[in-house]
Amino acid sequence: MQEFWADKIKIVDLLTKKDIQYKIPLNQREYSWWKDYIENFWDYLIDEEDNYFLWTIVLNKEFQDKWYKEIVDWQQRLLTITIFLSILRNIFYDLKEVEKSNKIQWSYIADLDDDWEAEGYKITPWLSLRDFFEKYIQDKKWNIYESIPETKEEERVFDNYKLLESKINNYIGEEKDKKIKKLKILRERIKKLELVYIEVSSWEDAFTFFETINATGMKLSTADVLKNLLFKNTTKSIEKINFIWENKIVSNLSYWDKDFDITKFIRHFWLSKHRKITDKKLYKELKNCINNELYKDYDSLILDLVKHSKLYWIILYPNVIDFPWLKMPFYHFLKSIDNLNVIQVNPLILSLLKIIQLDKFNEINTLKIKKFIEKIENFIFIYKVTWKSPSPLEWLFSGLAIDFYEINNKDISRKNLENLIDKSIGKIDKLFPTEEEYKVNLISRLTYSRKNENIIKYFFDKIYNFSEEQNNNNVTIEHIYPRNPKTLKIDNEIVNSIWNLTVLWPIYNKTASNNFPINKIEYYKKSTISNNKELAEYIEKKWDFLEEDIIKRWEKLLNDSWNIFN
């Protein structure tokens, strides 16, 4: 870090710093405080025994030669404090305490120039909230109850204003003299709130700072600082680049999951085509990519992010219509990877998707690619089951991704692609767990639990080879010997082991319930899965299914599954 400065100050000192205003950059999240946050803020404020310490504000002084400092962290509280002060200002004004009202306005909310004329506000929100916040909170001429909030942010400001105003009115009571006295108490309490004031010299330093103190719960992501970097260096307007970021990149990735971590995509994007790099060095690498001539300018980087976000969307939310005819195995591959919940392979998938989507894909040996993705899938399952460290996976798949990215850019001929696939399989084989590692770990790894449901269904899908209509989404996990029998007990560890499980249609599973195996035969026979019919024949012939049968089944499934996955 180039420079770092910290001190403890009061809110009154923060808001009255001469010639300094605070700006919330576009990379920051929208105003998101809701009722519970306001309740906590209020309880803290009126607690007379509290020491007034109120967390940490982090500012970027990179633009100190201008009129503002950027808020890196604490923008939610500072906006809420401004709302609170605007309510005090308005109530003082309604009580004919004009001087006190103006003092709040011109000391803590707005600035005056040397001619006592308005000169901006202490805090400048991001574009999405700026007009509403300036008009109905910071400008004392307007009444917020005459506003019509149009966005969720504006609604939160409106709702929080009403809630805080209600709490203040209840606190100050009805008698005018007591009202003024209690308003002054609230004004002094907000002014005396203490915070740790931290200044950094750049967004890169801010990122490093947050990494260093991440254990405290504060967080600044690579996506946050990259967005800020792009906005400062693009040739496009702020409005245009913000539209591209939010409506093309973010919307692609958070289509179903609003909390999706954009940083995860950015890192996988980088690992899929450039050199392997750790999380810590990613931002610096992105910042230097223009100087290193990987991109001619930041606009080119933005366009590349947009293009890859569309491909990453396919990884996150695979849709069968994106993979017609010969490409269908890749769709099933993506669904399997989703069930296995292994994200380290995503850089390689990004590179392969670019090849899969090429018009000349049909000229390439599709059988070779099919065998390659089957190899990847089987490797991931066995690697996951054997509890090995995931770290080598990222380096393996990133290296392979870069190889496929380079061949895609240079020569995508059938021969070159087949040679690369053979070399890639060789690299995977070097990390492939042994048969002994697999068999020892499968016993403990695939124990039944809600968390393991997807991977258990995946296991039986591979062993039973479900028909098209009988896929993972249509089956439930069935305990052959029941979990909660009324009589006869088998150890829970054995009952919940993979060897006592199968998959069954929900309607049959529900009816079979906690019956003993002998009473479930008819449901197993109705199953479209041939292995369940064989299981029914075994139970019917033996007229029982107890611990020794579970162990016997264990030996068969263990050997069969190793042969399939290996």
Image (spheres, rainbow, N blue to C red):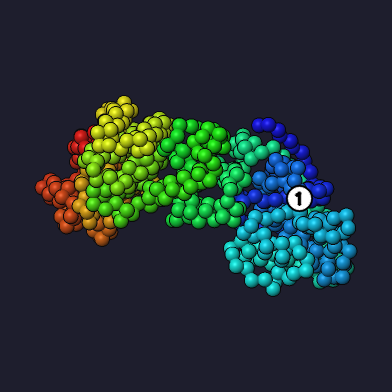
Residue 558's image quarter?
top left
Image quarter (top left, top right, bottom left or bottom right) of the N terminus? top right
- Tell me what residue is drawn at x 49 percent, y 36 percent: 294
Q: Nearer the viewer, residue 479 or 392?
A: 392
Query: Relative to 274, is 215 on the left or the right?
Result: right
Hey, which quadrant is residue 553 in on the image? top left
Q: Position of residue 65 (x, y in %)?
A: 76, 42
Left or right for 27, reference 98: left
Q: Which residue is drawn at the image coordinates 37% and 37% (left, top)? A: 409
Name the residue tied to disc 1. 21
Q: Amino acid at mark 1?
A: Gln
Residue at x 27%, y 37% (from the top left corner): 413
Query: In the image, residue 392 lies at what x, y percent?
Result: 40, 30
Residue at 58% over, 63% down: 152
Q: Secondary structure at mark 1?
A: strand
The spot of residue 274 in percent (x, y) is 45, 34
Position of 229 with respect to 303 (left or right) is right
Q: Is residue 448 visible?
A: no
Residue situated in front as seen by the camera: 398 or 183: 398
Residue with the most extreme top position: 430
Q: Position of residue 143 (x, y in %)?
A: 73, 71
Judge from the rendering whether residue 549 lies leftward or rightward of residue 455; answer left or right. Answer: left
